[in-house]
Image (cartoon, rainbow, N blue to C red):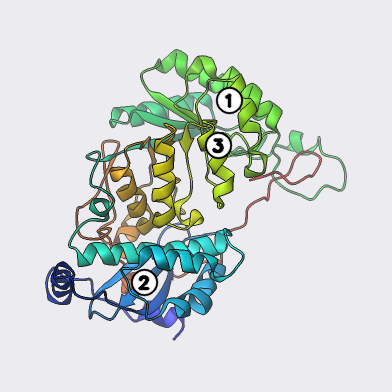
Amino acid sequence: MNRRTLLQSGAGLLSAGGPLAAAQQAARRGMPSPKIKAVRVLMTQPAGSQLVVVKVETSEPGLYGIGCATHQERPHAVAAAIEQHIGPYILGRNCDDIEDIWQSVYVASYFRSGVTLNNALSGIDGALWDILGKRLNAPVYQLLGGKARAAATLYAHASGKEIEEVEERVREWMAKGYRHVRVQVATPGYTGYGASAATSAGVQGMRPSGVIPSPVYEPTPYVNRTLKMFEHLRNKLGFDVELLHDVHERVPPSQALQLGRLLEPYRLFFMEDPFAPEDVGWFQVMRQQTSTPIAMGELFVNRNEWLNLVSNRWIDFIRCHISAIGGLNMARKVANLCEFFNVRTAWHGPGNVSAVGHAVNLHLDLATTNFGIQEQNFFEDPVREVFPGAPEIRDGYMYANDKPGFGIDINERAAAKFPYKTPGNNRGIERRLDGSVQRP
């Protein structure tokens, strides 16, 4: 049966009684773990991003779990890995053997720590944690040690073409109770991250002949514009609001070092991704040269990318995309290690994480002592239709609903109404003035 047929088949949500309640009672009596009966991939696009969700069905009638495997740039590759390799590999396994299943799937392909297989593993892993919570009639955060806080503090996004527009957006978020806001401003004539201006004719005229047509990015105008933005915002807003900024790996290391030092007077909550994952060796130099707090990790997929950064205290916030590192089972270990080096968590949480993935982030946030901040994402009405039980957002905080498992489900009939419009996204379309590819 193909994925389209699966999406169109429809599904009822688990009720509070019936088979689920029986499974929970059986777990409490110590009866054997249910077996993995089926692994299904559900692909849907209720808002902008191409979402990949895994549904693991068990030998207990009505008992299943869901996990996030979303990699919006290459969703079909992740789906194929699950359907053709991982799903068949784990059929018949005990659902409670989460660690053993994670470890065996991790090495099954021999080559490991790639983003496609990590996302596929994340979907399986999340579904198994969801099943365990349902069997024990407990939210997943209880399985991780219980709440360390009532809700997860969020940071909002404020951007604009003009600096004054960014100031206005920040004030709007402050009026809604937010204390943390990420700020990005467009650079006139150039494209950029978080806030872009159309490439002007004047900028295009500066390019040599023979360049592939593209949006134009240049680091020096961006750095100059960013410094002007922070000077303006601190003069107008003061220092009670926490301001964040995302460099997004777009400047050469030497300019990132300069930017970190020049931003010190503006006391950022953190500066994100000043270097690319390929350039993590520069973090030692940055730590020696600036006190600006650093967040890093959105593109990490391998533990060797972040291990030295944490153990040497070269970063202040770990910011992994949880599905890209293999899911909750790995992320909880990352968080625990970071605690001993006073590195706080700030998991990646934009719109290209499914509502299921946001629920995973939230449950880990609630149970993590060294939690720092969570990126905000609002769930539009179509998303909440597809994912009933999506986390609630109020006054700058994200709340769990305290239902068993992750407290979220997928309505397959609703999901089928939102098929993919494109097979995935592509990055790296921006180029420097001379025509060379710019990191996204």
Q: Going by the picture, which residue comes out furthest to the bottom?
A: 1
Residue 189 visible? The answer is yes
Residue 73 visible? The answer is no
Q: Nearer the viewer, mark 1 or mark 2?
A: 1
Q: Earlier in the sequence, mark 2 or mark 3?
A: 2
Which residue position holds label 2? Answer: 55
Q: Nearer the viewer, residue 371 or 417?
A: 371
Which residue position holds label 1? Answer: 287
Q: Give the Cα separation between the discs numbered 1 and 3.
A: 10 Å
Mark 3 element type: helix
Residue visible at 35% across and 73% down in the picture: 56
- x, y percent for residue 413: 32, 74
Q: Earlier in the sequence, mark 1 or mark 2?
A: 2
Mark 2 residue type: Lys
Mark 1 element type: helix
Q: Residues within 10 Å of mark 2 (few under 14, many from 20)?
A: many
Q: Give the Cα separation between the discs numbered 1 and 2.
A: 43 Å
Q: Residues within 10 Å of mark 3 (few under 14, many from 20)?
A: many
Q: Residues within 10 Å of mark 1 (few under 14, many from 20)?
A: some
Mark 2 element type: strand
Which residue position holds label 3? Answer: 309
